[in-house]
Image: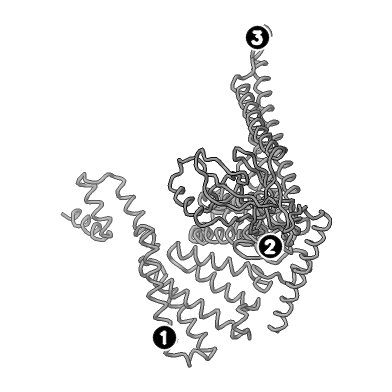
Amino acid sequence: MHHASEAQKRAGALPPELRLTGLGIHAGLLPPQAAEWTAQWREKKARGEGLSHWIFAVMGFFGSQLLVWPLLALVGFLFWNMLSVPLVRLAISGALLATGAFMLRPPVGMAHAQIGFAVLQAGLVALYLSLMTFGFMGPEDGLLPDTLGLIFLAVLTASAALAGPAWAQALLAAQATVVALGLFGRWTLFHDGFLSWSMGMPVYAINAAVLALAWAVLVASEGRVPGRHWLAAAQARCSPALTGMGVALVLCVTQVNASHFFAAVTLRKLASGSAEAGALAVPLLHLGLGAALQLALTLAAAGWLMRHWRLRQAGARSLGLFALAYGVLLLACFFIPLIGVVTLVGTVALGTHRRRLLALALFVLLLGLSGFYYALHWPLVQKAAVLAATGAALGALLAALRWGTASRRARQAWSSASLLAPAVPASAAAWASLALIALGTLAALTLVRHDVAGKEAVIARGEKIYVALAPADPRSLMQGDYMALRFDLPANIAGELAVRENRPWAPAPRIVARLDARGVAQPLRVARPGETLAADERLLPVLHKNGRWTLVTDAYHFPEGRGRPFQQARYGEFRTLPDGRALLAGLVDEHLQAIEPAPASQAWKEAEDETENKTQTREGSRATGDAETE
């Protein structure tokens, strides 16, 4: 009886979830592992994790923002006179920060944590505005001095360390990382500071390198400090914050690198869109301290992974692939500004099994490597030469690895066989692969040659006619500079062609155009099958491209950076055959005189002059802004 009462007391002392789970296991309704599952669930509940699907968590987060921010706006509107006093704003920010931190302390529920996070964010905004006031900064500047920026960073870091839910830690750590990247350079994510001029590289590159090294050391040392349980517990507690820090580093690097590639045109509007308009005022090929810093980070990442995975004991093939991958990354350090930071983060994520962060780093690396082709800084010929040389080097290395592996296997087979054994035949699969590659290359060359021969025949035997056009001058990301061609078709032709858009299976349409005394064609109607043309009428093919109908083609390409004379183009010169085949042969002016590209020396001199003018204008604007701030 005494033992039964003791057991009942122990059962009564258990949490209700564990007590019910134990009763279910005792009755045979639950498996023995249910107790462990319940304990894990209680741990997640204590941290505010895993209580609902992530969709509901996101919806609840935005719902909490909609609840808190309007309330704070109302309070600010009612007590605006009090908020104009700096000390009052500082006190209010401290109260909001303390309230948010208190609501985020573990254990905490999801809804409670979301409201607390919104209050904490409001406190951070209020603190930022208060520090701006104490730093004597105007509201139009929006920047903090470095000392006050360090205070703001310290508050953010403390908030991330004290937050209970893992998602709150990650978000706060990401915010702290962004602030740290902008220190010591007047928010150098967007403006280069003093060090960028004196050391030859922007401050954010130094900040990003220091943060990446610190992040790598902290992540790589997780669980590797024996005998110090308090340190292991602290590392486990800060693991979500390290994840947020790594994600923020990679995303900020992506934003910085965007200024060197095609996103500069589509997102930041730093280039006018044509190579002859001048490149951005930053070099594409970095050979200074910035490249050396990224090389050092990449080498550090490669050395750590080699030691972590003990790759020195691996086979030649594994070492070769390892050297191949990091060789490409080392080469990319001369072209992509902060690729070493992403390489270090991705390498440590690979070695520590952070798969999502690794996937993000790989995506950013591939984006940067592929974006090199779309950079507006170099002529296409030089970029193509770099890519071709890199591809040839990679192909040679892969071939050497393959033949080295095959030779080693052959030597092993020879040493294990008798001298009277027949020679090992070559692999049939290898010969089949080579044959397929050769056949594919031959087929591609044959198709290209056939297409070229057909177009040469049209140019050689075709009749010369002219069609009026309305030119533009965009830039083809894949093919360099070109002039977009737009032809004004009569309403009757446009209406009939619009009907044909709903019948893609119908034969390609052609239009009938009438020639005047100068050979200028005027579109008349859509051609009917088998109709007889008048003596002054010609057939022209039309195609549907980019959402509209156009004659023969919608673009005329010219050598990169040499298209200024084509601004005088008024007609397209076509060569046509009686069967309706046509080809754009060139562009002519209003007097039907052929237009030639500008000489290369003149074009590049104009581009350099325009780039220098843009640089001087940008530096003058920045100096004026700094003077007004002072």
Tell me the crowding category of disc 1: few under 14, some 14 to 19, or many 20 or more residues within 10 angstroms, Cα based.
few
Image quarter of residue 390: top right
Whichever of callouts 2 and 1 sits on the residue coming sooner in the sequence is: 1
> Circle 3 is placed at which residue position?
422
User: What's the residue type where badge 3 is placed?
Assistant: Pro
Tell me the crowding category of disc 2: few under 14, some 14 to 19, or many 20 or more residues within 10 angstroms, Cα based.
many
Observer-nearest of 130 and 335? 335
Tell me the number on the disc at residue 602. Answer: none
**Is residue 343 among the parts visible in the rendering?**
no
Q: Secondary structure at mark 3?
A: loop
Whichever of callouts 3 and 2 sits on the residue coming sooner in the sequence is: 2
What's the residue at 51%, 77% (across, down)?
125
Judged from this view, the residue extending furthest toward the right is 601
**Is residue 627 among the parts visible in the rendering?**
yes
Quick check: 184 left or right of 17? right
In the displayed structure, 429 sits above or below 309; it is: above
Instruction: Give the Cα distance between marks 3 and 2.
Output: 61 Å
Q: Secondary structure at mark 1?
A: helix
> Circle 2 is placed at which residue position?
205
Q: Position of residue 587 (x, y in %)?
A: 71, 52
Quick check: 596 left or right of 182? right
Q: Position of residue 66 (x, y in %)?
A: 39, 73
Judged from this view, the residue extending furthest toward the top is 420
Observer-nearest of 237 and 403? 403
Observer-nearest of 40 and 139? 139
> Circle 1 is placed at which residue position?
75
User: What's the residue type where badge 2 is placed?
Assistant: Ala
In the displayed structure, 454 sits above or below 134; it is: above
Q: Position of residue 365 (x, y in %)?
A: 61, 51
